[in-house]
Image (tube, rainbow, N blue to C red):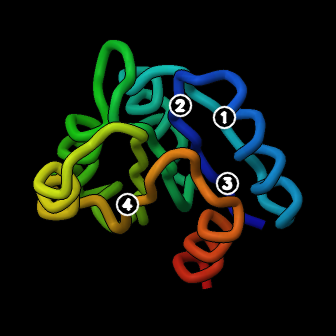
Amino acid sequence: MAKILIAEDERQLIEVMSKAVNSMGHSVIKSRNGRVAWEILCDNPDIELLITDVSMPEMDGEELVRCIRQDSNLFDIPILIMSGVIRAKDISNLLKVGATAFLPKPVSIKDLKDFINKNLS
């Protein structure tokens, strides 16, 4: 069982994703903005995977990814980043700054579970 952080400001989506993650036997920590997600990651070194939205209050997903990849304690954590409104160029940039993968919204639960299984095995 892994600890997974979900940073998403859309209440309904965070609940759907949490339910999917819990059904896989993992525990979920939720954050409604990027700054709180960053603080949670810094305070919980046992978090094994991050799922984050691009557009969030206080700190967006790209800034969160940059902070993680600059921190030697968090550098290796797999990061799934998602968005409903984004261009191919933006996706490429997110992957260059350190996101492990990108999924479009609405997020496919099958794709979400596939990412988790692939990155926690």
Q: What residue type is labelled 4?
A: Phe
Residue 115 location, quadrant: bottom right
Most extreme residue toward the top is 58
Frontmost residue, 68 versus 83: 83
Q: What element carries label 4?
A: strand
Q: Mark 4 points at which residue?
A: 102
> Residue 99: image x %, image y %?
29, 59
Which one is earlier in the sequence, the residue at label 4 or at label 1? 1
- Quadrant in which the C terminus appears: bottom right
**Which residue type does callout 1 highlight?**
Leu
Residue 8 numbered mark, or none: 2
Q: Is mark 3 on a helix, strand or loop?
A: strand
Q: Which mark is residue 13?
A: 1
Q: How far apart are marks 3 and 1 (CA)?
A: 18 Å
Q: How crowded is mark 2: few (under 14 residues within 10 Å), some or many (20 or more)?
A: many
Query: Which numbered disc, 3 or 1, marks the residue that appears first in the sequence?
Result: 3
Which residue is found at the position 60% from the left and 69% from the top?
111
Which of the pair 73/69 is nearer the observer? 69
Earlier-in-chain disc, 4 versus 2: 2
